[in-house]
Structures are given as structure tokens and as C-alpha cells.
Image (spheres, rainbow, N blue to C red):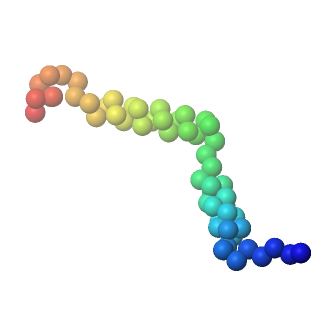
């Protein structure tokens, strides 16, 4: 007996997995991006009360 995928679940699953593989980033790249993001946030913060009041 052969099973037919009439709802397209297999194709949807394969497309989902292909999309996930394209977004794969190494751990070191994630760490570097997080560090860069943190440094940008720190540089955007006011350094004194007078800057904060502006």
C-alpha cells in the first residue's frame, strides 16, 4: 500500500528545514555579534547627567 501526501506536509517540512539551514550561524559569529551589539548600546548611552537631561 502506498501513502500519498495530499496535504503537502512533506514539501512544507523540507522547505522549513532548507530555510533553517540557510540561517545557520557559527557560535563564534553569534558571540562576536552579541559583543558588537553590546558595545553599540554602551556607546549610545549618556555618560553624564547633563547628557541625560538633554
User: Between 4 and 20, which is closer to the camera in this rendering?
Assistant: 4
Residue 22 in picture, x, y percent from top left: 63, 57
- Residue 50 drawn above or below residue 29: above
Quadrant where the N terminus sits is bottom right
Quadrant where the C terminus sits is top left
Q: Which residue is drawn at 55% across and 34% down?
A: 31
The mark total stands at 0
Give the residue at the far front of this rendering: 1
- Residue 42 drawn above or below residue 22: above
- Residue 51 drawn above or below residue 18: above
Residue 49 in picture, x, y percent from top left: 14, 22
Residue 52 occupies which quadrant of the picture? top left
Is 3 left or right of 19, judged from the image as shown? right
Q: Which residue is drawn at 81% across and 73% down?
A: 3
Residue 28 in picture, x, y percent from top left: 61, 36
Residue 9 occupies which quadrant of the picture? bottom right
Q: Which residue is drawn at 28% across and 34% down?
A: 44
Give the residue at the far top of this rendering: 48
Q: Residue at x 41, y 32 (%)?
A: 38
Is 45 left or right of 52, judged from the image as shown? right
User: Between 29 and 6, which is closer to the camera in this rendering?
Assistant: 6
Amino acid at each position: 500500500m502506498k501513502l500519498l501526501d495530499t496535504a503537502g506536509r512533506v514539501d512544507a517540512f523540507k522547505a522549513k528545514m532548507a530555510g533553517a539551514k540557510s540561517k545557520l550561524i557559527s557560535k563564534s559569529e553569534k558571540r562576536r555579534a552579541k559583543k558588537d551589539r553590546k558595545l553599540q548600546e554602551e556607546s549610545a548611552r549618556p555618560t553624564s547627567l547633563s547628557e541625560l537631561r538633554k
